[in-house]
Amino acid sequence: MKQTTLLAQGLGFPEGPRWHAGQLWFSDFRTRKISTIDLHGTLRTIIEVPGTPSGLGWLPDNTLLVVSMTDRRLLKLKEEQLTVFADLSQLASYHCNDMVVDSKGNAYIGNFGAPIGTPTAKLAQIILVKPNGEKRVVAEEMAFPNGCVITPDEKTFIVGETYAARLTAFDIEADGSLSNRRIWAVFDDLGIVTDRSKLVHRILPDGICLDAEGAIWVASPGRSAEVLRVFEGGRIADRIKVETFPYACMLGGPDGKTLFILTSDLARDGLVGRIETIRVEAPRAGFP
């Protein structure tokens, strides 16, 4: 079995990893901090986000965008100050979640749909926020849209639907709209399931990232606790198991071939989060 290397421990619930400017940036759900870490394990806190940070991305002028989960806002960080870039509270059906930002500054943001553990799923939306702050729903009836990527040609948006155990693709139109919805990969035939006792036995797409061979690395925090490398159509080309539960992953490093795996445990309190790394053959591609 492939072995990961521990880069950091004593974190809360690290997620939303992004390789940017020679460092891994990430949000911490429990400590409400955005932090960076380098390949030597040096951690630095960037800022605290009272509404709990999730997805991260950058505008073309290098302004950091931050999803603030519980107040359903997209924030921007400029000169060490957070301000509201877009209020999503009238569009998102529940807490906002992960995000991907393209080269033009278009930000695509998902949300939970309903509280985790709700017996009946409430389907959610993908919200587009334009670089000028304009916002609109571009996809509906999503089963807990989570990690998302955009292909290098910026023509395809792919998102993990956690409750449906699938990756779903859309074409990206010139105005940022999403069309031609289709299944990119599906891991079972159970459809949408919200019963947590059944969820743990599934592959659960959470955080994802794309490599240069067109495969997607998928963090799956189900009972198998693994990160999978998947090609379009559903072929699983690689599996990496970890000790706790992987909620996000990101390719980075100078050559883009270091896979960062962010793990924690929702059932345990305290600072049980970790960042682990492993070397892979195909480098990072696309966005984030």
Image (cartoon, grey):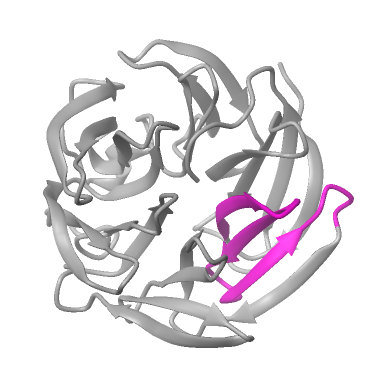
Q: Is residue 119 visible?
A: no
Write the start and end of the magenta stretch as one range: 14-41
Query: In which quadrant will I find the N terminus?
Result: top right
Q: Residue 261: which quarter of the image? A: top right
Q: Can residue 8 be seen in this view?
A: yes
Q: Residue 256: which quarter of the image? A: top right
From the viewer's side, name the closer residue of 182 and 143: 182
Q: Residue 280: which quarter of the image? A: top right
Q: Could you say where residue 92 lies in the image, as x and y percent from the top left?
A: 19, 68
Q: Could you say where residue 118 lies in the image, as x and y percent from the top left?
A: 20, 60
Task: Determine whether 239 is above or below 130 in the image.
Answer: above
Q: Could you say where residue 18 lies in the image, as x and y percent from the top left?
A: 59, 51
Residue sitting at x 22%, y 60%: 127
Residue sitting at x 73%, y 42%: 276
Residue 257 lies left or right of residue 140; in this view the side is right
Q: Could you say where residue 246 lies in the image, as x and y percent from the top left?
A: 56, 42
Task: Determine whether 230 is above or below 15 in the image.
Answer: above
**In magenta stretch: residue 26:** yes
**In magenta stretch: residue 16:** yes
From the viewer's side, name the closer residue of 56 and 205: 56
Residue 216 lies left or right of residue 263; in this view the side is left
Residue sitting at x 30%, y 69%: 95
Residue 240 lies left or right of residue 114; in this view the side is right
Residue sitting at x 61%, y 60%: 26
Task: Determine whether 75 is above or below 117 in the image.
Answer: below
From the viewer's side, name the closer residue of 38 and 59: 59
Secondary structure character of the magenta stretch overall: strand
**Label tally:** 0
Q: Which residue lies furthest to the right in this view?
A: 40
